[in-house]
Image (spheres, grey):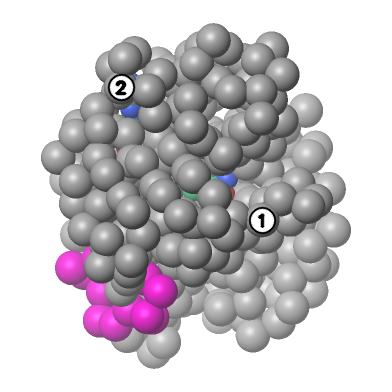
Amino acid sequence: MPITLGIIGCPIGHSISPVFQQAALDSKQLHASYQAWEIPPMGLAGFVKTFREEKYLGINVTVPHKEAVIPYLDELDPNATSAGAVNTIVNLSGKLVGYNTDTYGFLQGLKAERGFTCGGKKVLLLGAGGAARGVLQALIQERVSECVIANRTRSRAEGLVTAGLNMGIDCKAIGMTWEELSLAAVNADLIVNCTTIGMAHTMNEGSSPLQPQQIPPTALVYDLVYNPRETMLMKEAKIAGAKALGGLNMLIHQGAYSFYIWTGLKAPINVMYNAAQKALK
Ligand code: NAP
């Protein structure tokens, strides 16, 4: 029986996971197809239920389902439990197990910025959704000294602060007004955008959460948004004299880890990267 994998999200048009995951499956000559399903929040429970069927092997989970999907799963790996967010599900003969590979992907992506280490650094984390949860786990693991979490809905940022404080990181939540962001950004060594601001195929396309005058030239600005490859935030960072890193490397590495979870095989990183680059042109 052909195996089916795929990604669920809403919207899903921006995702290039189908392109590079299919290229990886084909290069390993696996008889499998990787699809994209646009599932609104109301349809999530019903859709996940169908994944217990034998033909489904795995799913990636993206905006806005990474937290909401958890109650429908049977088991979580320890990192997904700590993060409170799942981006990868494997179907083990009807049992659905959730993982969070964003944590790994984030750190692998950061390796592209040679010489930058998170340990002891001050971080401004923008966003408090599913991706921010995975990234916060990485920042905790790397022992950053301070993490300010800014979110449009401040109460959601407060939920993440507790996780950081419990692990001994100096954490606080703020809103996303100009004043709050300016005060927090001025001290930051690393600024990470985990919001959907700037993402292609959305109303936020072409926008940036920060302006150049708010970005210190000594900071590294890491935008998780990978479509477009150079976001408005990355452009603003460069205008400010800061370094900017996009989300493509992270995307490939989180996807490579998902591929390994599903197949037990080492992912063909170069095949995935080349397919992703082509898709973004
Ligand atoms: P999510 O759970 O839906 O969270 C979305 C976040 O964006 C929330 O913090 C939300 O704030 C904020 N937001 C949305 N619209 C906003 C606006 N107009 N102004 C201010 N804040 C706004 O989504 P997610 O799964 O965390 O994904 C977030 C982004 O990261 C997406 O662009 C996704 O593609 C990207 N991502 C990239 C990778 C990668 O490998 N490169 C991996 C994971 C995610 P509220 O809480 O106030 O709604």
- Image coords of residue 84 (percent x, y): 28, 64
Of 230 and 1, nearer the camera is: 230
Quadrant in which ligand 1 is drawn = top left
Q: In this picture, which residue range is highlighted in magenta?
A: 70-80
- Quick one: quadrant of the N terminus? bottom right
Instruction: Give the amino acid type for the residue marked by disc 1 in the picture.
Output: Thr
The numbered dot on residue 180 is 2
Q: Is 103 within the magenta?
A: no
Q: What amino acid is at disc 2?
A: Glu
Quarter holding residue 225: top right
Other-residue count near label 2 (Cα within 10 Å), few / some / many at <14 / 14–19 / ≥20: few
Q: Is mark 2 within 8 Å of ligand 1?
A: no
- Which label belongs to residue 277? none
In the rendered image, the vertical position of residue 185 relative to residue 141, given as above or below: above
Callout count = 2
Q: Residue at x 68, y 74 (%)?
A: 31
Q: Distance of mark 2 from mark 1, alpha carbons?
A: 26 Å
Horizontal arrangement in the rendering, residue 145 relative to residue 241 (left or right): left
**Residue at 49% across / 75% down in the picture?**
57
- Is residue 150 in sight in this rendering? yes
Q: Which residue is mark 1?
A: 117
Residue 265 x %, y % = 71, 82
Q: Secondary structure at mark 1?
A: loop
Position of 196 relative to 114 (above/below): above
Q: Quadrant of residue 79?
A: bottom left
The answer to the question of whether label 2 and label 1 lie on touching residues, with beta carbons closer than 8 A, is no
The percent position of residue 20, horizontal first and vertical second, equals 70, 52
User: In this view of the protein, which residue sits in the foreground, 113 or 34?
Assistant: 113
Residue at (71, 67) in percent of width and height: 25
